[in-house]
Amino acid sequence: MQLLKTDDGSYTLLDPEQQETYHSKFGARTESDQVYLHNSGVYHRLQAQQPTSVLEIGFGTGFNFVHTAQHALKWNCELHYTACEMLPVSREIALEVLTHNAPEANDLCEFTADAIGSIAPENRPADQPPKQSVNLALNSRTHLHLHRVDARSHSWPGAAFDAIYLDAFSKKNNPSLWSADFLKKLRAASRPDTRLATYCVNGEFRTALTAAGFSFRKLPGPKGKREVLVATPLPTDQIVDQYQQKTDI
Ligand SMILES: C[S@@+](CC[C@H](N)C(=O)[O-])C[C@H]1O[C@@H](n2cnc3c(N)ncnc32)[C@H](O)[C@@H]1O
């Protein structure tokens, strides 16, 4: 796994085997901020101090969580963040990415890297299996539920999440995470106004979204990606480009 500096100065990882980066090489922070935090509506929910539950598919380095949690902390808003990760990176490499990207949030970075480490097989003594799940509280309002699991074989409670970050590797390497069958599981975990945010706008994926009961809207993407996508069980007329109202932390 290689540390990679992206065009906006933030860092991500490159998986040399799959030739996939964990965030856009054009800007990891920008992607996390625009494609996930803003397009999902989470930024505005947190700013309005509405308790918010997020499901992320593909926890990776934990940076989407750290970026989201920084806003929850800033506005003192309750955040329940549930994430699935099939192949956790090591605690050390996660911490390296996170402390480069959020040096001002050292406790949060350590908390997140510890969570990844506790489900990563290489961090456990040989006679102890790694944990399948950890439920951790950074404080009384910020909760992380992290599962080491193949998301394809996992189920979530019905109508449980306000937002879904679908941040799996590309359709080429991870086809089933973009399929109608998998999206039906995410639809079941959604409320009528849940927003699913992702970087993928592929035609087959859009057809699969419709088959799974989502409507969708394309929004302008960050540098390097002309368009990205937001999906919701309700018609998408209400979805506006909330990234225009961006405020830096
Ligand atoms: C694009 S990266 C996610 C980046 C991450 N959101 C972050 O903030 O660093 C995709 C992640 O999906 C994970 N993944 C791939 N297939 C999966 C599956 N079937 N179930 C759960 N996680 C999976 C990969 O191991 C990888 O960590």
Image (cartoon, helix red, strand yellow):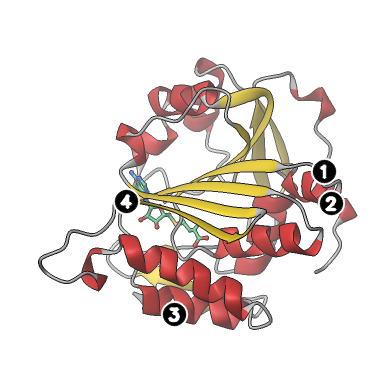
First reached walking from the N terminus: tag 1 or tag 2: 2
Per the model, the C-alpha gap separating discs 4 and 3 is 20 Å
Looking at the rendered structure, the secondary structure element under dot 2 is helix
Q: Amino acid at mark 4?
A: Met
Looking at the rendered structure, the secondary structure element under dot 3 is strand
Looking at the rendered structure, the secondary structure element under dot 4 is loop
Quadrant of image for the C terminus: bottom right
Q: Are marks 3 and 1 in contact (CB under 8 Å)?
A: no
Q: How many marks?
A: 4
In the displayed structure, does residue 63 sit left or right of residue 76?
left
Question: Where is mark 3, residue-wise?
Answer: 3
First reached walking from the N terminus: tag 2 or tag 4: 2
Relative to the observer, which residue lies in front, 157 or 66? 157
In the displayed structure, does residue 219 sit left or right of residue 246?
left
First reached walking from the N terminus: tag 3 or tag 1: 3
* Residue 44 percent coordinates (x, y): 82, 46
Per the model, the C-alpha gap separating discs 1 and 4 is 32 Å
How would you rate the neighbour count of disc 3 (Cα within 10 Å): few for under 14, some for 14-19, many for 20 or more?
some
Mark 1 against mark 4, which lies toward the viewer?
4
Mark 3 against mark 2, which lies toward the viewer?
2
Residue drawn at 56 percent across, 19 percent down: 210
Image position of 64 with respect to 1: above or below: above
